[in-house]
Amino acid sequence: MVQLGQTVSVSGLLLFGTTTSLLAKIVYELKSTGKNGEEKYFRKPWAMTSLMFLGMSLCLPLAYYQERRAKKRSEAEDPLLSFDQYSGVSGPGGKRRSQLKEIALLSLPTAFDLVATVLMNVGLLYVTASVYQMMRGAEMLFAAAFAILFLGRKLNRYHALGIVCCVVGITLVGTSSILSGEGSSTHVVSTEEMLLGMGLIITSQAVQAAQLTFEDFFMADLNIPGIKIVGYEGLMGALGCIAVMMPIAYYLPGLEGEGVHEDFVDTLAMISHSRLLQVVLGVDMAALLLYNVSGMAVTGHLGAVFRTVLETMRTLFVWLVDLALFYLHVGQLGESWSVYSWLQAAGFVVLVAGTLVYRHGDHEANRRLLAEALALRNTEAPAEAEAAESGALYGVTAPLLTSSAAAAAAPAVSSPLAMAGYGSVPSASLPIDAVGTPTSRMSFRATQTIVSGSYSRSLTGSYMSRPQWANAANENNDGNHH
């Protein structure tokens, strides 16, 4: 992870997060000349999807630069026994853990992400930036539903209240958008188109929730740093979109600018003919990179709950800046304030309250899991001591691993508890007090809503089902929750 201070990382998250959301809509309101010499708006959701993944892929050079620095620093401190936490090399002649299989596994969530991003960008054609940002709160609903269905998670009363608030908030925001009739500052958007846009955005959040559920179940132990995960997903997503999806969209029926058919030759012509468009797209890519870096730094410094609060502030800033662009008469950009905007404001407040209440439910669930694990360990401690005494009495020299030895023998891992603000938590096969995960290994998905599933599964399936010393000496798994 890039070592950013708290103030810098918080400011970066708000600034670059707001920038990416605004530019995603602003670019649709810019004009340029196409391949036929006709001036038109740059309504190219497939191109914007490719741009988003290209911006994410910029994390890869940064990740490898950090990996190289970390390796040099480790070798300088102890050249005889170095440990590269990024590549998995331990000691002279250590065996490098191959990451090829793990990187290939990333192609599956990348496919989810690609579909979700296309749906969001098409939906954004028909709604304002603020409504788009608020509608993305629907992800919490689907994440909770999938966690119940596929991860066997049980929701507590705070989760239920948060979900109710989310439904009410999204309903209020959607209703205000339809009543105001404002979906774009450059052309009239019909009610049917608004409903289509909001439906596509909500559907995209269901796809992203499915992605998170898949990651939580199959990729909880992925041994790749978070920033490298972002980079590889960006690289694979960009290749998939440019090499596969955009050629398909070129041959699909429909009108240009409606989200189905898209002429990539015309897209290149429009970009080449507008310096303003080139600048906006370049700034958007850079902002995507800096947003991801700042987001991981915020999670590492202040925890996922604080980042959740910041993300709600980002939504507010998107709305305020969009209003300012309209009333400062910056071209034809922004959105106006109407009598129905009060309804949207009420929906936003309810959404924020629901998010925070749901997060409190995560805290309560994780606190309960931790208390149960500690209680079980306390009941096992006398039996372990008796076993050790029996071994010494009969001259048995089996290498039983105590809590302190286990803590020293293997590294701790990031987990949903750490992500929810409880600090580092050890691997499922280590004692619960073996802590100390470096924040640089925290996954960029640390702020998502289904944080309990994989930890509770590994805790009950591994730690609670065997003695705490079992196989601890052989553990070398960083267990990032992606």
Image (spheres, rainbow, N blue to C red):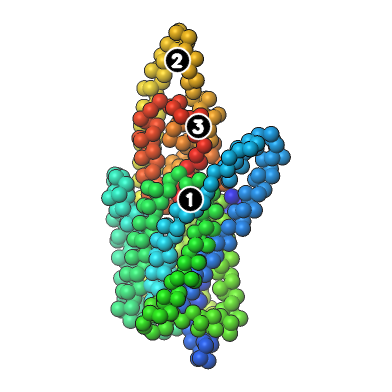
| Neighbourhood count class around disc 2 (C-alpha, 10 Å): few under 14, some 14–19, many 20 upward | some
Give the mark toward the camera: 3 or 2: 3
Q: Which residue is mark 3?
A: 474
Q: Which residue is mark 2?
A: 388
Give the mark toward the camera: 1 or 2: 1
Q: Which residue is mark 1?
A: 101
Q: Where is residue 459? Give x, y as percent.
A: 38, 36
Asked if the residues shown at circle 3 and circle 2 are in contact, with their CB atoms under 8 angstroms apart, the answer is no
Q: Is residue 413 above or below residue 255?
A: above
Towards the viewer: 98 or 309: 98
Lower sequence index among marks 3 and 2: 2
* Residue 348 location, quadrant: bottom left
Q: Where is residue 428? Give x, y as percent.
A: 43, 35
Q: Amino acid at mark 2?
A: Ala
Residue at 41% in and 77% down: 249
Q: Is residue 115 above or below residue 354?
A: below
Q: Amino acid at mark 3?
A: Asn
Residue at 62% in and 53% down: 64
Asked if the residues shown at circle 1 and circle 2 are in contact, with their CB atoms under 8 angstroms apart, the answer is no
Q: Where is residue 146? Give x, y as percent.
A: 31, 53
Drawn side of residue 348 relative to residue 56, left or right:
left
User: How far apart are labels 1 and 2 at the CA level?
Assistant: 40 Å
